Image: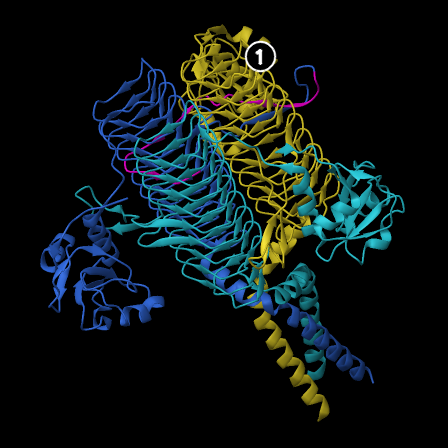
Chain colours: A cyan, B blue, C yellow
Amino acid sequence: MGTLQTQLSVQELARRIGAELRGGGAGDISGVAPLETAGPSQIAFYANPRYRKELQGTRAGAVIVSDEDAAQVPASAARLVATQPYVAFAKASALFHDGLVIEPGIQAGALIDETAEVHPTAAISPGAYVGPTARIGARTTLHAGARVLDGARIGEDCILWPGAVVREHCIVGNRVVLQPNAVIGSDGFGFAFDLEGDGGGPMHRKVPQAGIVRIEDDVEVGACSCIDRATLGETRVGRGTKIDNLVQIGHNVQVGPLCLIVAQVGISGSTQVGQGVVLAGQVGVVGHLRIGDGARAGAQAGVAHDIGEGETVTGYPAMPHREWLRMSAALPRVPELLKQFRKLQQRVEQLEREKGK
Amino acid sequence: MGTLQTQLSVQELARRIGAELRGGGAGDISGVAPLETAGPSQIAFYANPRYRKELQGTRAGAVIVSDEDAAQVPASAARLVATQPYVAFAKASALFHDGLVIEPGIQAGALIDETAEVHPTAAISPGAYVGPTARIGARTTLHAGARVLDGARIGEDCILWPGAVVREHCIVGNRVVLQPNAVIGSDGFGFAFDLEGDGGGPMHRKVPQAGIVRIEDDVEVGACSCIDRATLGETRVGRGTKIDNLVQIGHNVQVGPLCLIVAQVGISGSTQVGQGVVLAGQVGVVGHLRIGDGARAGAQAGVAHDIGEGETVTGYPAMPHREWLRMSAALPRVPELLKQFRKLQQRVEQLEREKGK
Amino acid sequence: MGTLQTQLSVQELARRIGAELRGGGAGDISGVAPLETAGPSQIAFYANPRYRKELQGTRAGAVIVSDEDAAQVPASAARLVATQPYVAFAKASALFHDGLVIEPGIQAGALIDETAEVHPTAAISPGAYVGPTARIGARTTLHAGARVLDGARIGEDCILWPGAVVREHCIVGNRVVLQPNAVIGSDGFGFAFDLEGDGGGPMHRKVPQAGIVRIEDDVEVGACSCIDRATLGETRVGRGTKIDNLVQIGHNVQVGPLCLIVAQVGISGSTQVGQGVVLAGQVGVVGHLRIGDGARAGAQAGVAHDIGEGETVTGYPAMPHREWLRMSAALPRVPELLKQFRKLQQRVEQLEREKGK
């Protein structure tokens, strides 16, 4: 990540990030910083009440906040009030930072097959590999050790970090980021248990994984995340979906656009995930399900059934979030309930005995 | 994955996959496809009732099915009835697809130590590495950036995809597939907490991980899966076992033959897994256990105790599957039970009061 | 892992590992081995009662044990009695094994930018990459395909195994080990949902991940583990902390010294983990929490709230371990409780009816 030598008046900054400037006196801004370390020439960001103390003590020149939180900003700081404060912060930070920029062209030590097509504006680092008939689009960067196998296509303005792998014939759109060691197009886990085998007794016979993975525009895939190629046809990740680290996406899964798939989630084969779905960390989803648009699953949920549009589920097995909240509040009371139940049984027995007299 | 220019009569196809041909009229078959996209010159496959609608609407020339499902295939399609339909499908697909084939020999840009032994029929891509005294068997492929360190041995007909690592002295059998970025022989997680340390206070002292990993024949290891070398001796994965992506196998684990270990499973150190065991996605198994032959653990199960031969467990902590089913159906009723229990207590109190009169 | 041709008298061995020698007759020791395979010239180690049978049958020349277990060692073996037996074993094993040693210097096929600074005693294997202005300290080893990007700094005596990635500007201390395909400095998962977007409708706008990762001295990071760079400032892993395979550490997480983080754990962004914390396998920790010094979380726990100093939690949602033990023993009894509750209700109804007579 490079730091740009940018200096902006707070008025100009407000204009560029679409925020309303309140309070004043702030001079030029030359960077962004956390509340606790920001100085008078830096802007900070506040949204989570966990950091109220840091807000109150901040020496930042300006703070990006919501209208609701604006009154809490100390008088020393200008307020940059935004309807989408986190978006405003993202825009502000992007004014001061850009990514690691590599010179366009094929550097010495890059391994490019003679039948590959690499756009002249693409940047290919030493040790990166582009296989036979693969294509790399304009302004795309392959960092050291990124690998694109035979016939795969990478669009424009993509970044493939070291160790990212795109296997043969897979298709990656524009503005896609593959974090280090991400894997696109590994074989799906498809084996048919064959009682007869090929003469050596029973075996798991490999089902050819003859399809591909298609990654649409503006997708990001996290470090060491794996997206398996389809058995037939395509595994697909929709436009603008963001995938965190160490996520597993099985063969023939269809992920819609604008989803957020948090670290260590696993989605089994052939499941269809709608638009704008959020799967929190370590969620597991079994195969062949339909997850409706806008559905959400809480961290570590085990999703064994379809989820309807806009539903939120939690727990294992996953259930509607409210039901889960009630249940998980009640369960720690079960040991005491068992004791009290025995006592109540005894009292009823006593009543029954006495009645008989 | 390459597509072969194969064309077969449906009779010949039936013969080759060991299926019985019913219904007719189908011409030559030139490929396999999903039910919903297959055309008259393609075969499709049906087994999961979730896709009954797709079966009824299919335009496939032939469909591979079980005897039981055969009647549901539309009249336009020939039926290829098999006792093991998924096996028949695997065989059929293999007739039309083969993997990415690399020319035998060491390509320019491959990094081969002069003391390594690479069989002349092995194919070594640019950027692949074979270290000192390592050995690569006949017809084995190392794709770009696969790495085999000092003294490791890879058998015949193996495929190491980009970024797969086999660390020093590990042993890999024949027909083994390592998906991209799989790691064989990383150090086990062995640290002894030393209150005294080496003069700098308490420390976690590293226990040398002096053993190896042995991968037997016909094993597949998924993308970004990690198999740790033994502290002493061997970590072992048995013949024909298939491991999905992002799986962790700790040091000194012994996995028997013909197991299926689904994505994101973790098996802690020294656990012994029998033959034909199935661990579903995200299962965790603690160390030093014995998992009996044919045992199964449901998705996300937390296995803290031995599992007997043929048993199926689920849940956290894992318990017999039937018990877990009963329990997990009952637990959502606990909040209501607590309410009703209070009411019943009051009714008993009332009876007790009245009795006293 | 190399095996050293060392031979030591059992007396000398006892002295070097700080153990008390009891029983005798043992000759020279030339290696360590598991109880079940060790011979008279080898030492073994015993601590786990699961392996009592192996202890009783061992032919090892000497066994490292605690004072408490010493009496169980067969008479044929010398006893090496240690107050910290596992530490003594670690020391003993280190006398007989060292790691894979690479010749110092930059080997042919290594890819080193001309502005990088590589210490002359560092060992850089073929296919390893050191980017512009990056620095590699004394006696550090980069195995084939390890990659250090622009401006990153690696300290002294480190080992970066194949495929390990340190992204731009990250800082790695001394004696740090990065197992194969570990990723340091991937982008944090930071996206601001922007209803307006840039003209193409709503989007997840990327928040620049402008910070770094700082890895302190004596840290080990497991295979395919991912530590995300900070949004601003630093993600930090403290001195002597050991991280297992496939672990996810989010942006701006602060991990204290001497922690143990077991395989497949995920820690979400901005969480602060104290000193000496132990997180067992597959634990998930949500963001912005504080985990106190010496806290522990059991396998698969879902940690959704702060954990106090020295507390142990388990379960999902995580609760004090004792409470969880009581609860998880009680829950399987709920189905029976529901049945008995209905019966008790009926008996109370019966009493109420009779009372009315």
Which of the 4 quarters of the picture holds residue A289?
A: bottom left
Magenta stretch, main secondary structure class:
loop
Residue hosting label 1: C138
- Highlighted range, magenta: B200-224
Circle 1 packing at 10 Å, graded few (<14), some (14-19), many (20+), is some
Q: Is residue B215 magenta?
A: yes
Amino acid type, mark 1: Ala
Q: On screen, B291 above or below C114?
A: below
Picture residue at 26% right of the left edge, 35% below the top: B175
Viewer-side residue, B240 vs A93: A93
Q: Is residue C4 above or below residue C146?
A: above
Foreground of the two, A342 or B24: B24
Tell me the quadrant of the picture where the C terminus of chain B can be found.
Answer: bottom right
Q: Chain of mark 1?
A: C
Asked whether residue C119 appears in the rendered view, the answer is yes
**Image coords of residue A21 (percent x, y):** 81, 51
The correct choice, above or below, for C72 with respect to B277 in the image is above
- Residue drawn 62% across the image and 55% down it: C193
Number of numbered discs: 1
**Residue A323 percent location from the top left of the image:** 62, 67
Name the quarter where the N terminus of chain B is drawn: top left
Residue B352: x, y in percent?
A: 77, 79
